[in-house]
Image: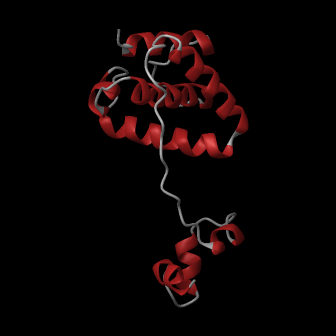
Amino acid sequence: MTIKLKQIELIVERYFAMKINVKSRSRYLVDARKMYFSLARVFTGKSLAVIGNSLNRDHATALHNIRSCDDLRKTDKEFDEKYIALYNIVSRLKPDVKKNKTYEIPRVIHPGYFRYADKKSIRKIFNKRGHSAKQCYELH
């Protein structure tokens, strides 16, 4: 028994009590779609193009939503709790499969990012100082 994209879509729609396949950029809808794309990637062996086509989007949109879902899970506690709840619901559909482990490559964050986080562009700030952001990585 394999989990189908439609099953994941229905679970997400029931959880949030709304349709996720609509053209809207409301925050709650965007977050629900991010969770759908991420769960679809974890629990199905489908390609990004197929996952994107399930909601009338392209593969680049699916990839962007998966990556931003991972980033939001690290920073937004409420988002992470909702994702974990959905993950547990979807994982019950397929009890015989081991949990997919994800291994993350540690990201190097430049210390200047935290100092200038409220600014628009970090690269512009670094370039004004006389060196590029790439050189800053080499210096530290």
- Horizontal arrangement in the rendering, residue 66 relative to residue 119 (left or right): left
* Residue 12 can be seen, yes or no: no
Q: How many marks?
A: 0
Q: Residue at x 55, y 25 (%)?
A: 32
Give percent across and percent down for residue 107.
Answer: 53, 61
What residue occupies the far bottom of the structure in this picture?
Answer: 130
Give percent across and percent down for residue 84.
Answer: 62, 27
Q: How is the image coloured?
A: secondary structure
* Residue 101 can be seen, yes or no: yes
- Horizontal arrangement in the rendering, residue 55 relative to residue 82 (left or right): left
Q: Residue at x 46, y 19 (%)?
A: 22
Q: Residue at x 58, y 67 (%)?
A: 109
> Which one is in front, 93 or 33?
93
> Which one is in front, 65 or 39?
39
Which quarter of the rendered picture does the N terminus lie within?
top left
Q: Where, by quadrant of the figure, is residue 27 drawn?
A: top right
Tell me: residue 53, above or below residue 63.
above
Q: Where, by quadrant of the figure, is residue 50 drawn?
A: top left
Tell me: residue 5, above or below residue 58.
above
Q: Where, by quadrant of the figure, is residue 55 drawn?
A: top left
> Which one is in front, 74 or 65?
74
Which quarter of the rendered picture does the C terminus lie within?
bottom right
Tell me: residue 34, above or below residue 102.
above
Give percent across and percent down for residue 70.
Answer: 54, 42
Q: Residue at x 31, y 33 (%)?
A: 48
Give percent across and percent down for residue 133.
Answer: 50, 78
